[in-house]
Amino acid sequence: MKTFGRIVLGTAALGAATVGYAAAIERTRWTLREATVPVLAEGATPLRVLHISDLHMMPGQRSKQRWVAELAQLAPDLVVNTGDNLAHRHAVPGVVRALGPLLDLPGVFVFGSNDYYAPKPKNPVRYLLPKARKKRIHGIPLPWRDLRAAFVEHGWHDLTHSRQTITVAGQAIVTAGLDDPHLKRDRYEDIAGRPDPSAALSLGVTHSPEPRVLDQFAADGYDLVMAGHTHGGQLRLPGYGALVTNCELDRTRARGVSRWGAHTWLHVSAGLGTSPYAPVRFACPPEASLLTLVPRSNGAGQEGSSRQSRTRFGAGADIS
């Protein structure tokens, strides 16, 4: 019995240490993930795209705000924001503070569910349940219109049910986006159709990478689709990967670069935040992504290469 008691106590201690690490250390281990993706037209000049997603900002998260602001040092050609910026009704100033230096660069965005509604306390076990067994619970409305106004005022393009051709580093890019498929607000028919084949890149943007949406972008011939929402699984097991994706996407694609069909590439960001009611990450640090896009002729037949680097621009732990 003494041996059994020691095993139980040891297991409990290990579990408590793991939870403590996931809550106190891993969720503020800001990480930059880099990847090279062969998606540009032949002869196009390589582009550097910074992907920001799932900030889930709370007003007191100064460490996150500092780190994101200093990503401007990377001097990307384009910033893509795939939503879920907010987690509190007073968080808009914190998001603008974090993205401030990046708002001076070319940028596009769509919103996610947690831009529209605040999170609510939930049983964390629900996150691991199959999607069909979950009942969606909305919190209070959030000031997404104020956030949109700040983004647009600085020149970022709102791609919600919009298709726009923009010029980035002297090259034409067809961009198109959707409202959040997780909330079933997407209306792909508003942007349907093949993009201009003379553009250097055709880029689809969505918050949740639902396969039905990815199939539509791929059928129209988009080169690259960028999404967030999954948090990379948020909880990952070494050798197994993400436990869930919180959508219909298979868990092997919960973060990073993958192919979607014969032509289209997919990049899913693991994001930079968590719900304030589930503030843990395990084997899945919060991240931003820097994609180097190169011509297909430079990477024909190759899988997009990816590497992760722990880059801590801002110091200090968040207080909330």
Image (tube, grey):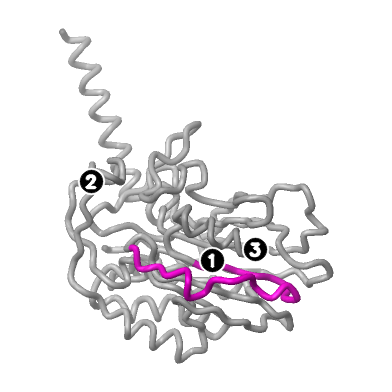
Amino acid at circle 2: Pro
Q: Which mark is residue 176?
A: none
In screen coordinates, is 173 left or right of 204?
right
**Residue at the (48%, 59%) spot, across then down:** 213
In screen coordinates, is 279 left or right of 194?
left
**Are there few (<14), some (14-19), or many (20+) residues within 10 Å of tag 2?**
few
Secondary structure beneath label 1: strand
Amino acid at circle 3: Gly
Sooner in the amino-acid sequence: mark 1 or mark 2:
1
- Closer-to-camera residue (277/66): 277
**Residue at the (38%, 88%) spot, across then down:** 149
**What is the C-alpha distance between the residues marked 3 and 1?**
21 Å
Q: Contact, CB < 8 Å: mark 3 with mark 1?
A: no
Sooner in the amino-acid sequence: mark 3 or mark 2:
2
Amino acid at circle 1: His
Q: Is residue 125 visible?
A: yes
**Residue at the (31%, 67%) spot, across then down:** 114
> Residue 97 lies in what quarter of the image?
bottom left
Which residue is labeled 1 in the image? 51
Task: Give the x, y percent position of residue 206.
Answer: 47, 65
In screen coordinates, is 101 left or right of 76?
left
Task: Give the x, y percent position of residue 66.
Answer: 44, 72
Secondary structure beneath label 3: loop
Secondary structure beneath label 2: helix
Which residue is labeled 3 in the image? 221
Task: Give the x, y percent position of residue 115.
Answer: 32, 71
- Closer-to-camera residue (152/137): 137
**What is the C-alpha distance between the residues marked 3 and 2?**
38 Å
Q: Which residues are magenta?
A: 184-205
Q: Is residue 197 above or below residue 130?
A: below
Q: Which mark is residue 124?
A: 2
The single residue placed furthest to the top in the displayed view is: 1
